[in-house]
């Protein structure tokens, strides 16, 4: 073997000049044709200058006449690092675009240089925040966002400053603002409290339910739904907001301090009286002693629930209260006309199931107002047709309260409840044994104020809007109404 044989010593075979013996089996001409272009050549091909764009040739010639040193790759222009074009090769569209020195624009066919571009909203915002002066066209493009109050503070300041100097933009801004006013009429954010009832009535009129909710349970269904909607977006701070429960007892005005979560726990525990009467699970089974279970009143059950909690109630009390209210409405719907035989024991007294459901709706509304006041949120009274039922329940309960009070002189008081459509006049006997006695006084109250008086949230002295006749008789009726309240 020869010394140059790679099989002898591993030295690569050197091709001889003029032969086609290359490692790849190609000729030198083939190697030259497939060799990738070099980007660091010292000088362009001989015909490079002839093939360069006209503007570049002129700049290169001017630079050589002035004695300026040329740069590698392109006469009169610095070479571009990383360019993949071969020396002397035309760029696409280079003849159709004459770039100006310092433009910074790439040659693109059919595009004219240095046209003013309206920046994108984000770019305009960044320019405004940076304090850059925005052009008239940019500010005009922001008028729509400004009319919708969608501009940033910097953009708003720039647009409003421009409106003081440009009459055309000021007229356009005025027209846009008027259009926005027509599209977005001012409306309160709170949903109409009767919306749910109206939607349900419309739906049920088209497709009646197989098992409808009885009329005497509608108020409880509506009030629990409204309170649940109020609680939906509460955070931890709202759940622990302080609330003062108030009622009017034998010793006068009484109150108890708790939290929003504590109020829901109170509603859960007292609603459990109705749940047990309907055969449902008592939520306080673990909280109450066996001897008190079923016989404790609302106050005793609430205190037992609070004591049984290892920690103060939190947002987690909402789910069991909500589930229990749904079960109560569903079970009451299944009872139908058979509900008249049911009674709900409140410890010292009992109410028929119909009245007990109205009583729970009444307390749910009153305590929802307590919660809304604690978090500084407006809360409307019940729908008028529901409010009329709550007023009727309080009026029907008054004779029993007056009968338990010390004997009053014979006589009647005309109680006028104002409000539409539940307004009405009621004759209240001071002594139930003499219901036909002569009228000795007349008093007028607003329907909502009468309910708040019955809840112990308004004192008897502040409740009456109009009084006429025997003051003692009026005080007796108002005090008996306030004593309907309890914890």
Image (cartoon, helix red, strand yellow):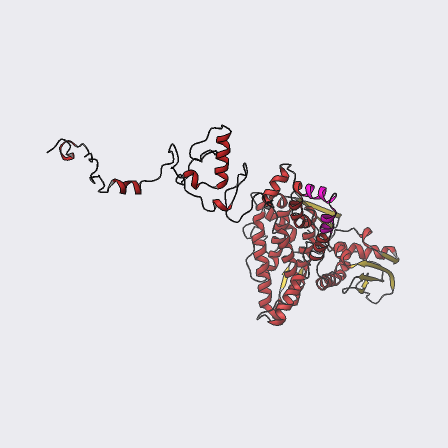
Q: Where's residue 443, x and y in %?
A: 84, 59
Residue occupying the far right of the picture? 469
Residue positioned 50% across, 30% down in the render: 65
Q: Nearer the viewer, residue 171 or 29?
A: 29
Quarter of the rendering occupied by the N terminus = top left
Tell me: residue 201, above or below residue 317: below
Residue 308 higher or lower than 15, as above or below: below
Whole-percent x, y for residue 134 in the image = 65, 41
Main SS, magenta residues = helix
- Provide residue 486's location: percent of width, then percent of height: 70, 52
Find residue 119 and report its image quarter. top right
Closest to the observer, 359 or 373: 373
**Location of residue 39 (image quadrant):** top left
Q: Is residue 423 visible?
A: yes
Q: Name the side, left or right, on which 427 lies relative to 386.
A: right
Is residue 157 within the magenta segment? yes
Relative side of 440 to 76, left or right = right
Which stretch appears magenta? 156-174
- Which residue reaches farthest left? 1
Quarter of the image for residue 124 reads: top right
Total labels drawn: 0
Q: In this view, does 18 lie to the left or right of 50?
A: left
Image coords of residue 13 (percent x, y): 18, 34
Is residue 175 covered in magenta? Answer: no
Q: Out of 53 and 283, give the one closest to the viewer.
A: 53
**Rendered residue at 83%/58% (across/down):** 408
Q: Which residue lies furthest to the front in this view?
A: 65
Using the rendered image of the protein, determine whether residue 244 is visible from the camera's viewpoint: no
């Amino acid at each position: 073997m020869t010394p140059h044989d790679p099989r002898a010593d591993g030295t690569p075979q050197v091709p001889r000049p003029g032969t086609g013996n290359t490692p790849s089996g190609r000729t030198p001409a083939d190697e030259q044709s497939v060799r990738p272009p070099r980007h660091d050549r010292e000088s362009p091909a001989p015909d490079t200058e002839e093939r360069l764009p006209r503007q570049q040739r002129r700049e290169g010639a001017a630079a050589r006449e002035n004695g300026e040193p040329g740069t590698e790759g392109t006469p009169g222009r610095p070479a571009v690092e990383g360019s993949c074009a071969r020396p002397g090769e035309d760029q696409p569209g280079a003849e159709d675009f004459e770039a100006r020195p310092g433009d910074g624009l790439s040659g693109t066919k059919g595009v004219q240089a240095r046209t003013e571009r309206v920046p994108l909203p984000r770019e305009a915002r960044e320019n405004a925040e940076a304090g850059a002066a925005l052009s008239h066209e940019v500010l005009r493009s922001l008028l729509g966002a400004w009319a919708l109050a969608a501009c940033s503070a910097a953009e708003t300041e720039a647009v409003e400053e421009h409106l003081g100097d440009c009459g055309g933009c000021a007229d356009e801004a005025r027209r846009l603002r008027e259009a926005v006013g027509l599209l977005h009429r001012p409306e309160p954010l709170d949903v109409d409290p009767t919306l749910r009832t109206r939607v349900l009535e419309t739906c049920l009129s088209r497709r009646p339910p197989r098992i409808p909710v009885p009329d005497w349970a509608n108020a409880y269904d509506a009030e629990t739904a409204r309170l649940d909607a109020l609680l939906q977006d509460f955070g931890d701070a709202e759940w622990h907001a302080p609330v003062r429960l108030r009622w009017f007892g034998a010793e006068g005005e009484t109150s108890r301090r708790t939290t929003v979560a504590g109020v829901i726990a109170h509603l859960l525990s007292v609603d459990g009286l109705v749940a047990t009467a309907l055969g449902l699970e008592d939520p306080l089974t673990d909280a109450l002693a066996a001897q008190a279970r079923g016989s404790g009143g609302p106050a005793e059950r609430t205190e037992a629930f609070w004591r049984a909690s290892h920690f103060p109630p939190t947002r987690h009390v909402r789910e069991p209260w909500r589930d229990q209210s749904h079960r109560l409405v569903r079970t009451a719907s299944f009872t139908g006309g058979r509900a008249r035989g049911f009674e709900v024991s409140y410890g010292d007294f009992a109410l028929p199931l119909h009245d007990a459901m109205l009583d729970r709706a009444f307390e749910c509304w009153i305590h929802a107002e307590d919660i809304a006041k604690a978090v500084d949120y407006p809360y409307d009274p019940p729908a008028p047709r529901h409010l009329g039922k709550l007023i009727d329940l309080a009026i029907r309960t008054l004779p029993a309260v007056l009968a338990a009070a010390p004997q009053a002189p014979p006589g009647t008081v005309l109680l006028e409840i104002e409000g539409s459509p539940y307004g009405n006049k009621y004759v209240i006997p001071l002594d139930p044994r003499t219901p036909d006695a002569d009228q000795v006084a007349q008093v007028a109250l607003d329907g909502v104020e009468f309910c708040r008086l019955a809840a112990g949230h308004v004192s008897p002295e502040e409740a009456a809007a109009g009084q006429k006749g025997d003051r003692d008789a009026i005080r007796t009726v108002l005090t008996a109404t306030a004593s309907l309240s309890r914890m």
